[in-house]
Amino acid sequence: MKNSIALKTIVTKEIFRFIRIWPQTLLPPAITTALYFLIFGKLIGARIGDVNGSSYMDYIVPGIILMSVISQSYANVVSSFYSTKFQRNIEELLVAPVPNWVILAGYVSGGVIRGLLVGMVVTLISLIFADIVVNNVLITLSMALLTATLFALAGFINAILAESFDDISIIPNFVLTPLSYLGGVFYSVGMLPAIWQTISKANPILYMINAFRYGLIGISDVNIELAYLITVGAILCLTFMNLLLLHKGIGIKN
Amino acid sequence: MNALSIRNLRKTYNNGFEALKGIDLTVEEGDFFALLGPNGAGKSTAIGIISSLVNESSGSISIFGHDLKTDRSKAKSCLGMVPQEINFNQFDTVKSIVINQAGYYGMPRKLALESAERCLKQMDLWDKRDTVSRRLSGGMKRRVMIARAMVHQPKLLILDEPTAGVDIEIRRSMWKMMQELNEQGTTIILTTHYLEEAESLCRNIAIIDQGRIVENSDMASLLSRMHIDHFVFDLAEPLSIVPVIEGYQIERIADKVLNVGVPKEMGLNQLFKQLSELNIKVISLKNKSNRLEQLFMDLIDSSSSVYKP
């Protein structure tokens, strides 16, 4: 009971935080993705033609939605938890009888909710440009939820280990964004030379984007079961790592 | 029952610095306890370990009988912590800071609201409940931290230099508030650099230096060890010769100012009688220094000489 109240407190605080600063958290992804749809989908896509039997606009919609989910769930946790460390109000949680798993679950839930909320906003915008009929609701929703969870967990590790504000921008800028773009958001890996197809398959984001794309429009470059295996496996690994870091107090205690 | 019990607590930081060298400390329920020491002595490390902000190297701590390692949740529920530096989210309102803290302790929302209202009223902050905390004055921010620490009604409250940097008016109101909390049954551990604060508020005292407890006793016994009180006398007329009165240490600081050491067993009456006989008129007198401060310096000096490598 006490833990559920503590969890609810953290989650509510996180939701109020990103809603309070909605011009920084909710508006920019909406504008950016609207531009993606307009430029890549509408203007350039018309000249590209179909990809794997789907119009280019329809093909890029799932990737752009999931890319927003990935970046927003990650950004929410890394910025919020690092600020909590930086302002030292993490001490409010450490002094109180809040178990580590509640701290982790609270921040990750905040990241997941923001990721999915932005994903919904982007989906609504996509409906202006594309005519999407959902192929499999369960796969679509579960893959969005799992992906948001995975990147919220990754953001938490980044925040724990970060020692400066530079450290919380390095991973999103130099790892997440390139991996998302190279994860088949705008193209099918089948369009790449063989060697790049092999290299691309080492990118976990490729599996999530393709599984989500399968859920939305029924097209995928990868095996869906494998995509679930990789995503759930990564979630378990990152959860364990986060709990270990919290238990040892790395980055948050002396 | 002991509010706090510390056994052989040690802490060595990653850089090899040994901040605590095996301290033992007991604070009884209901006490108003002073934990003093110079900067870098180990007080903040000890408080950090008690409040789970610092990992100990070895040793054990129990709070109201609950071991901090094996019965963590209950031990933490008994503790309220007011840190030295402002550590709440400065973008949150006063009320949300206090209510969120209640939530972290598992208080249902309705109870949290009632408790927050009571604590904020007690700290004279109720009118500021919807103010964003960064807009508060320094004294108000400190009172927010006390309200936050009290919201779950802890039995043990640790105040780490709560009056540092606040003006005398706020300091006195905080002293009054701390005394009230103690009278209501809250055990208080206070660290401060204002030794007159510790002397006037606390019943028991521990002095820590170089990671060791160098003194742990009740305030009255500690102060009774002062054999000589020092006074400064302001005289009506300048003196050319310093008077010699057996048993008293008298030195001239300025033409009309004397520094007088008065042994406790001799007192002031005899001194005044003899000064009158010498036709020396005293206009006023004051204590040269705070008694605890003098003892503190003596203990720290002797600790430094004992433990010097």
Image (spheres, helix red, strand yellow):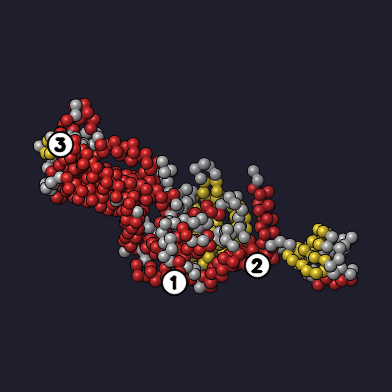
Indicate whether B80 appears above or below A245.
below
Residue B141 at x, y percent in the picture: 49, 61
Quarter occupied by the N terminus of chain A: bottom left
Mark 2: which secondary structure? helix
Name the amino acid, label 3.
Ala
C-alpha separation, residue under disc 3 versus residue under disc 1: 65 Å
Mark 3 chain:
A
Q: CA distance from mark 2 to mark 3?
A: 89 Å
Q: Identify residue for label 2.
A: B220
Instruction: Please name the amino acid that badge 1 sits on.
Output: Arg
Where is residue B197 shown, x and y percent of the image?
A: 61, 64
A222 is higher (above) or lower (below) than B279: above
Chain of residue at mark 2: B
Q: Give the label, 2 or 3, closer to the camera.
A: 3
- Callout 3–callout 1 Cβ contact below 8 Å: no
Residue visible at 52% across and 46% down in the picture? B12
Depth order, front residue of A221/B127? B127
**Residue that label 1 marks:** B118
